[in-house]
Image (cartoon, rainbow, N blue to C red):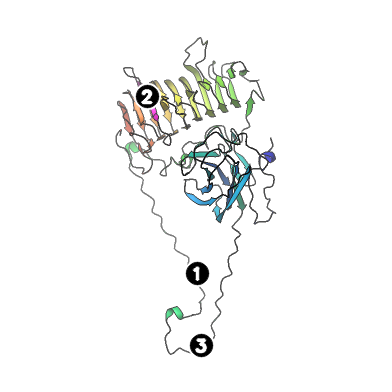
């Protein structure tokens, strides 16, 4: 499908009437699911940025008679500040409904914004796998996973993503400076030579001539930098507070900087290809299967299947895996003749793994590296028992069910486990067991390093058995957990601090 087919061809060019705002999605695009089965209040939105300064004059969304109730729209800054609101007209037809703000909202180039509306009774329009890559047109960019949502009775800032969905929310954008016509300034006429007054008039009655201004600029205030809070062991917190709101603004991973690289074209399996260098597709089990040691599987998109790794030194790079299987990347397959828990030195880079309640974890158990991996929809983010490196990765939106015991990382702590500079954003979900569940009672738990991560959510954030030579350092913790950080007996604790204050956390809490 061409860009012109995806986006509205009627976007205003630079020669169009400046006062005519443009929308982005083409009116001919129809949702694959016009009426979702959800019947609860949910805020649905789209993240976007603009290439040049301009204004957002309004919002529109795709409605059907099943999308019932009063619909309100909001424009949000990248940190969740509501910039403007509007109310949509009530309609009983199917199609796009638009409304405008009472005053256009100025937007800056390169900054992230979100436009959203509240569907008070669910029943909204959606197309999954629409935003698997960033899409740009006429100065407006929707990033990968631009579609966002938030379940809340009265709405709220939407940040959750699901299967790269498009919730059919659009913006009315006007490039350039606002065109509102300002009233002409009142020109104060030069006073005629007046006789010296015998009575000094009150100041409020004096129409004194306006002298030529000396145009003294306002002094530039001296900005005193905020002091860097003290931390232990010489560590330095990443700049900014409340990074969990938009992790990438503080340099942490989130949906904008993990998964397939922007602009990479993905080959659909099996629709567009059934084999490639070092792999083949098996239709009987809906799986890509490796065929050679050292194979690199790159730029692939797989729906409702898995990748079976049964060779050494395999690399999976720039992949999108939407899976209903137990393990989307499967190193635990039937008929293995070696250690069935080992991934044999597998490296997974810039990959998005989307699971369902069936999915136990994006990756498991031993002998792998995950770098730039975005996992959501599974019960656990990762299972990591030994010889595992997880870095620059993002876990959020786990699927919670009765007795699911969800964890960001679940590990038997069998040695050589490192989780570094990753984001675990689980604080918006109830019933998550832990961000890190580590160790086994009575076992030789050892060799776990948790370093420079953004850690959010869980009952206990760290739910651990005693771990020999464990290291917990330079991590940023939120307060969004049920009981607190937790205790990791036997592990060193240095340089950890709070996300909202940057205050150091001197001990396991």
For the question of whether residue 134 can be seen, the reply is yes
Mark 3 lies on residue:
194
Mark 2 lies on residue:
438
Q: Is residue 22 left or right of residue 38?
A: right
The picture quadrant where one finds residue 144 is top right
- At a point 35% along the width and 27% down the height, the residue shown is 463
Mark 1 lies on residue:
215
Vertical position of residue 198 compared to residue 377: above or below: below
User: Under tag 1, what secondary structure?
Assistant: loop
Marks 2 & 1, CB-CB < 8 Å contact? no
Quadrant (top left, top right, bottom left, bottom right) of the C terminus: top left
Q: Is residue 199 left or right of residue 37?
A: left
The picture quadrant where one finds residue 197 is bottom left
Q: 345 or 138: nearer the eye?
A: 138
User: Under tag 2, what secondary structure?
Assistant: strand
Q: Could you tell which of marks 1 and 3 lies nearer the N-terminus?
A: 3
């Amino acid at each position: 499908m061409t860009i012109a087919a995806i986006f509205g061809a009627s976007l205003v060019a630079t020669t169009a009437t400046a006062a005519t705002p443009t929308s982005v999605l083409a009116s001919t695009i129809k949702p694959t699911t016009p009426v979702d089965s959800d019947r609860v209040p949910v805020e649905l939105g789209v993240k976007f940025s603009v290439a040049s300064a301009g204004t957002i004059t309004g919002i529109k969304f795709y409605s059907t008679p099943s999308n019932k109730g009063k619909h309100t729209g909001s424009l949000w800054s990248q940190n969740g500040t509501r910039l403007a609101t509007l109310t949509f007209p009530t309609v009983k037809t199917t199609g796009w409904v638009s409304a405008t703000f009472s005053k256009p909202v100025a937007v800056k180039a390169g900054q992230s914004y979100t436009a959203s509306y509240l569907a008070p009774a669910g029943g909204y329009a959606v197309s999954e796998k629409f935003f698997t890559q960033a899409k740009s047109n006429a100065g407006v960019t929707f990033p990968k996973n631009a579609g966002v949502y938030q379940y809340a009775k009265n709405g709220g800032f939407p940040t959750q993503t699901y299967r790269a969905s498009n919730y059919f929310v659009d913006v009315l954008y006007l490039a350039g400076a606002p065109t509102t016509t300002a009233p002409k300034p009142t020109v104060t006429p030069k006073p005629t030579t007046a006789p010296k007054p015998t009575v000094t008039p009150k100041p409020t009655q004096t129409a004194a001539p306006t002298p030529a201004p000396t145009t003294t600029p306002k002094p530039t205030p001296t900005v005193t930098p905020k002091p860097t809070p003290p931390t232990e062991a010489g560590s330095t917190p990443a700049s900014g507070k409340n990074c969990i709101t938009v992790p990438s603004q503080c340099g942490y991973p989130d949906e904008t900087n993990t998964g397939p690289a922007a602009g990479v074209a993905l080959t659909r399996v099996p629709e567009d290809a059934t084999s490639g260098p070092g792999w083949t597709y098996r239709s009987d089990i809906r799986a890509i299967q490796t065929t050679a040691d050292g194979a690199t599987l790159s730029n692939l998109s797989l729906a409702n299947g898995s990748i079976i790794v049964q060779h050494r030194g395999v690399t999976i790079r720039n992949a999108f895996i939407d899976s209903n299987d137990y393990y989307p990347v499967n190193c635990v397959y039937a008929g293995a003749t070696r250690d069935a828990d080992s991934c044999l030195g597998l490296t997974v880079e810039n990959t998005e793994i989307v699971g369902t309640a069936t999915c136990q974890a994006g990756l498991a158990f031993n002998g792998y590296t995950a770098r730039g991996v975005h996992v959501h929809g599974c019960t656990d983010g990762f299972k990591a028992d030994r010889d595992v490196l997880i870095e620059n990765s993002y876990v959020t939106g786990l699927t919670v069910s009765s007795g699911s015991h969800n964890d960001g990382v679940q590990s038997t702590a069998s040695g050589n486990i490192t989780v570094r500079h990753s984001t675990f954003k689980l604080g918006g979900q109830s019933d998550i067991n832990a961000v890190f569940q580590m160790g086994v009672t009575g076992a030789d738990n050892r060799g776990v390093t948790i370093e420079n991560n953004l850690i959010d959510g869980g009952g206990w954030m760290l739910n651990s058995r005693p771990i020999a030579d464990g290291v917990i350092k330079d991590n940023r913790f939120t307060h969004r957990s049920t009981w607190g950080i937790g205790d990791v007996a036997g592990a060193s604790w240095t340089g950890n601090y709070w996300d909202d204050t940057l205050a150091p956390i001197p001990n396991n809490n």
